[in-house]
Amino acid sequence: MQISDAHITDALTLDAGSVRLTRDGYLVAVATIARTGVQTYRAAELGLADRDADAPVRVYRPADEVFAPEAMASLAHRPMTIDHPTEPVTAANWKRHAVGATGGEVTRDGDTIRVPLTLMDAAAIADVQAGKRELSVGYSCELLVADGVTPEGEAYDAVQRSIRGNHVAVCQAARGGPRLRIGDGDAARATIERLQGRVAALEAQLRDAAPTPAQLQAMAEARAQLVADAARVAEGAIDAAGRSDAELRRAAVATRLGDAAAAMSDAAVEGAFAALLASTRVTDAARAVIAAGTLAAGDARRALAEARAARADRFSKAHRGAVEAA
């Protein structure tokens, strides 16, 4: 059996994150207003007089019908109403029923259709703010009454064809379920939960990355040693405040090599720093021998000269190797 131009209502919901009030007090949103699949109607709603008025009828809305260009276009610039009027909305009765309108950008989103909408009536807006947020589409279609099974394996009793929108009603409970809403707390809660999950993950990463007390002690000792070594290379006090380890080495080397240090890579600076530091230790060793009095003055001068020569040779080779490695 086929019923042409059956007038049917369907229902969905407003999305929480999209709802806002304009400067003039209008409520604007982007809403999900239609979906594919099987929905249950009362026989009386479908105009089926061959069965009990309250008998449930499972009606299948195929994707190729719901997303047909003509069907989607028919949902643009439709009147918004509070609950369903007892008649289709037309130019003749629009003033009695309309409280706003849908926009023109009708888009598919998975198995649903989304459309912008505006409510302009203060009482209608107050109803939405008080919790009346589900949406029900009033439309006409050709209804083919015939048993079948959807590709997903769900049984049905009738199929809709040639779906054409007439109006979109704000109602208390939508046939399509709470997915079809103007904006309740579900989307907001989901967003908050996602953000809380991200915060927890970041906190865990920070805990994992935080150094242990032993590691902090080792880092402090290594920094103190580097500051002391930099002072030895610079042959005097050097300001370490605000400088990274690499910057501190470069500053120390610059006191000995001048402007040449500025053109050196970090690896070359590190090599030069090591060579200069080693040379200071050779000189210190010679000084210690002299201070101990184990050498005659002539021998001490000779030992010092040899130490300096060794230092110069070591420095020249270490510096060249560091530059080549860089």
Image: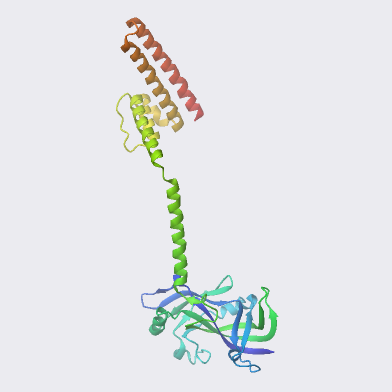
Q: Quadrant of residue 231?
A: top left
Query: Is residue 252 shown left or right of residue 204?
Result: left
- Name the foreground residue: 102 vs 38: 38
Q: Position of residue 56 (x, y in %)?
A: 61, 87
- Name the foreground residue: 207 vs 63: 207
- Name the foreground residue: 135 vs 95: 135
Count of numbered marks? 0
Query: Is residue 80 shown left or right of residue 244?
Result: right
Question: Relative to residue 203, is residue 117 depicted above or below?
Answer: below
The answer to whether any part of residue 35 appears in the image is yes
Q: Residue furthest bottom?
A: 49
Residue positioned 44% across, 17% down in the render: 313
Q: How is the image coloured?
A: rainbow
Q: Position of residue 4 (x, y in %)?
A: 64, 89
Q: Position of residue 244 (x, y in %)?
A: 37, 37
The answer to whether any part of residue 106 appears in the image is no
Question: Relative to residue 126, is residue 191 depicted above or below?
Answer: above
Residue positioned 50% across, 90% down in the render: 85
Q: Position of residue 43 (x, y in %)?
A: 61, 90
Q: Quadrant of residue 240?
A: top left
Residue positioned 38% across, 31% down in the render: 249
- Name the foreground residue: 7 vs 296: 296
Q: Quadrant of residue 211?
A: top left
Quick one: quadrant of the N terminus?
A: bottom right
Query: Is residue 4 shown left or right of residue 311?
Result: right
